[in-house]
Image (cartoon, helix red, strand yellow):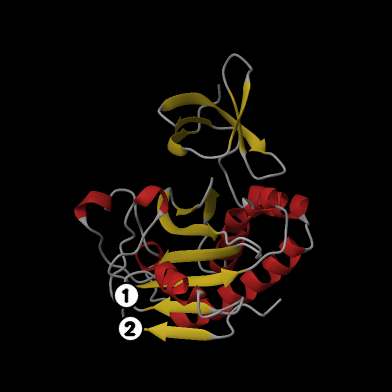
Amino acid sequence: MAKIGHPLRILPQIDSTNEEIKRNLAANLPEGAVVIADQQTNGRGRLGRSWHSEFGSGLYLSTLLKPDLPPENLSLVTLMAGVATATAIQHLAPVKLKWPNDILLNGKKLAGTLCECIYKPGSIPAVIVGIGINLNHTSFPKEIQGIATSLKLETGKTINRSELVLNLLQNLNSEYIEFLQRKNKNLIRKWTEQSNMFGKTMTVHQKGKTLLGTAVGLNPQGKLILQTPEGKKHVLDSGELIEAISKNL
C-alpha cells in the first residue's frame, strides 16, 4: 500500500478532482495519488448535486485507493473518509458526522465526501475518494445559504489550508491502514462517536419512499438502521436524510 499523498498534484483550476483522477487511471496512476485544486468548475457532491468550489476558499481534494477487499467492505470507504476528515477538523471546530457522507458544524454542512468505485475485469477495484471542506468562504450562493457554512464563518478565523491538508492526509493514511486490516468494528465505533444523529427522530427519503423513524445505529457494513414508531427496523444502504430533530419517538 502506497502512502496517501504520494504523488501529490496541486492545480489552480480543474473541472473536478475526482474526474482528474479518472482521466489518469489508464496511465496506471498509483494508489495514494492525490489531486488538490484551488478551484473546481464542476465540483460534484452526492446525488449529482454540485459542490460550490470558489477559488482559494476551500479544500477540494481527491485520492485514489485500490483496496484488495471483498466488495461488501467497499461501502465502508465512505465512513472511513468521513472519520478521517472529521478527525482532521476537530481541533478547529466541534464537527459532527451525518450519515452517509456529510460533516456538519452547528447543524450546517461544512464538508462532504464523494466515493466512486471503478471496476475493471481481472483487476482490483479502484476507489476515488473526493473530499470537499469549506474553509474560508465568507458567503454562499443564495440557494445554499441556509444549509452551508465554513470554518471562517463559524470560528472567525482564517484557516491555513496547507496545515489542514497535512493533517487530513495523515488521518486518511492511518484510517486506511486500519480499513485494510478489516477493523470494521473500530471504524463503526469511531464514526458513531463523532455523530449525534442516533436516538433522534428523522425522515429519510429513499427510492421514492419516505420513512419516519429513529436512527438506532449502523450495521457492520455501515448501513443505517432506522426503527419506525411501530418497532420495525429498516436497514438502509442509501437515502437522503431530509430532517433530524431532537424529539424522541
- Could you say which is closer to the camera, residue 186 or residue 248? 186
- For the C terminus, the image quarter is top right
Q: Total number of numbered labels?
A: 2
Residue at position x 51%, y 74% in the image:
25
In the image, is 113 to the left or to the right of 38? right
Tell me, for residue 39, which label it has, or none: 1
Q: Amino acid at mark 2?
A: Pro
Residue at position x 71%, y 76% in the image:
1
Q: Position of residue 244 (x, y in %)?
A: 46, 35
Q: Position of residue 129 (x, y in %)?
A: 53, 64
Q: Position of residue 32 (x, y in %)?
A: 60, 77
Above or below — where is 102 with respect to 62? above
Contact, CB < 8 Å: mark 1 with mark 2? Answer: yes
Which residue position is annotated with label 2? Answer: 12
- Could you say which is closer to the camera, residue 182 or residue 198? 182
Q: Amino acid at mark 1?
A: Gln
In the image, is 159 to the left or to the right of 42? right
Q: Position of residue 214 (x, y in %)?
A: 57, 28
Q: Quadrant of residue 44?
A: bottom left
